[in-house]
Amino acid sequence: MDSGKVVENIYLLVIVTLISVLQNALFAQKVEKECNQCSQNAQKSAFERVACANRNCMDAYPTFLAVMWCAGLCLSQAPAAFAGIIYLVVRQKYFVGYMGQTSQSTPGYLFGKRIIFFLFLMCVVGIFNYLLTRHYGSDYKEYVETITNAASALLLLP
Amino acid sequence: MDSGKVVENIYLLVIVTLISVLQNALFAQKVEKECNQCSQNAQKSAFERVACANRNCMDAYPTFLAVMWCAGLCLSQAPAAFAGIIYLVVRQKYFVGYMGQTSQSTPGYLFGKRIIFFLFLMCVVGIFNYLLTRHYGSDYKEYVETITNAASALLLLP
Amino acid sequence: MDSGKVVENIYLLVIVTLISVLQNALFAQKVEKECNQCSQNAQKSAFERVACANRNCMDAYPTFLAVMWCAGLCLSQAPAAFAGIIYLVVRQKYFVGYMGQTSQSTPGYLFGKRIIFFLFLMCVVGIFNYLLTRHYGSDYKEYVETITNAASALLLLP
């Protein structure tokens, strides 16, 4: 099972998934915007804070899984898995930070935007590369993979 | 990698996923029923409305992804992706409609029922077709795909 | 498409998914702990109860799907599907039990821990088996599958 064959069978599904991820991001941004405007009056209990942190993490979880798997299947799995690990670290920090807040300045609704964006880009490059290969017969996949592997190290920057 | 081989490795998983989707639909319907009975007294703020709309969309998101991918893998990807696009349009309308409401008449909990049902049907047909092929050796897959492609156009009807 | 080839392309993704599932379990446990401490004062309406039960089920749904599919793809699909069915039965019981409660003693946040743990273990064994096969060339997969099939029957114990 070489990778081009897999992509052939799923590339339309991946494209729809990517559009849905974009839409999710749009929705989440609206929530984030409203959230910032009205979170001043909230003095939440410990339970409310931990439940809210958990909910925010769970809301973003299917999106993360979908993007990571698409990126891993369409392009190459090592950088996708690496970005996934970084995302999990960021999520852990977010959760701990959310619980530790006792005043009203809770962190926002979103986190890990950069990593999701990177995985999203990987999917787009993978799909684009597949379409190029099919229509023109030239395969840049190896170059792209090398570049992606290098670029994924950039995620470690704070 | 022809499609029959893939289905062979996952058809039990797809069946369980379908049952879980049915169960999700059952749960959501219970929520919908209760929701209609008690939403008269709610005069929600803008933040509550956008958060609620986002939550309802996110609740349905894993179900949608699972059904779309199963339908795409088991039967054929073009109509599944097309139905997915339609679902995203419906979701966008739902979200905008939810936010735009200033009175108490918010839209219900569910949306895109018809599209989910169509994708669900595609999965069932794909599994059924695979089992028929395995036990009787006759393959109706091409006829079924043609019919599905035609039927997916019906989703465009309002 | 034999199973070893599939695992080769996704094993890093599966590992990251497993870590994310562990993290989800950690988060959920924190919620559970706080939940027990403060749920005495809640006398919830019918709508709140059904919405809460649905939300708890939906929160756990992506985790369940991810673990079940990984277990099915990495090791073998029959026990994974069987465990999935058991999980759905447990979830149905949980939902009905949650709705039926009229006093303050609602069930906790978590359910089906044992089944998720079993599926998690199946993934770990599958990955471990793949790595052993790749590095040492010995394949214990058939033994492991037989043991797993037998072990999955243990889930039926109350």
Image (cartoon, coloured by chain):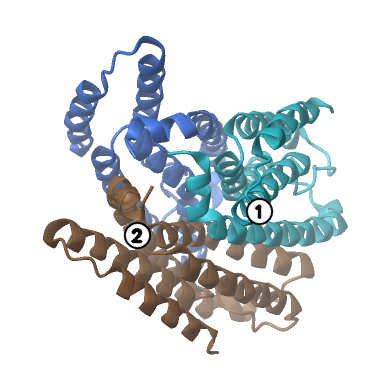
Chain colours: A brown, B blue, C cyan
The Cα atoms of the two marked residues, 2 and 1, are separated by 39 Å
State left or right for residue B158 relative to residue C130.
Answer: left
Q: Tell me which chain the residue with mark 1 is part of.
A: C
Give residue A18's mark.
2
**Which residue in the structure is indicated by mark 1?**
C136
Q: Is residue B23 visible?
A: yes
Nearest the eye: C148 or A25: C148
Q: Nearer the viewer, mark 2 or mark 1?
A: 1
Q: Tell me which chain the residue with mark 2 is part of.
A: A
Q: Amino acid at mark 1?
A: Tyr
Q: Secondary structure at mark 1?
A: helix
| Residue at x 13% of width, y 58% of height | A135
The image position of residue A120, as x and y in percent, is 38, 68
For label 1, count other residues whose C-alpha is less than 10 Å away and answer few (under 14), some (14-19) or many (20+). Answer: few
| B45 lies above or below A115 | above
For label 2, count other residues whose C-alpha is less than 10 Å away and answer few (under 14), some (14-19) or many (20+). Answer: many
Residue reaching furthest bottom? A158
Say if labels 2 and 1 share a chain. no
The image position of residue C158, as x and y in percent, is 84, 28
The image position of residue A30, as x and y in percent, is 42, 70
Q: Is residue B108 visible?
A: no
Q: Amino acid at mark 2?
A: Leu
| Residue at x 24% of width, y 44% of height | B82
| Residue at x 82% of width, y 53% of height | C39
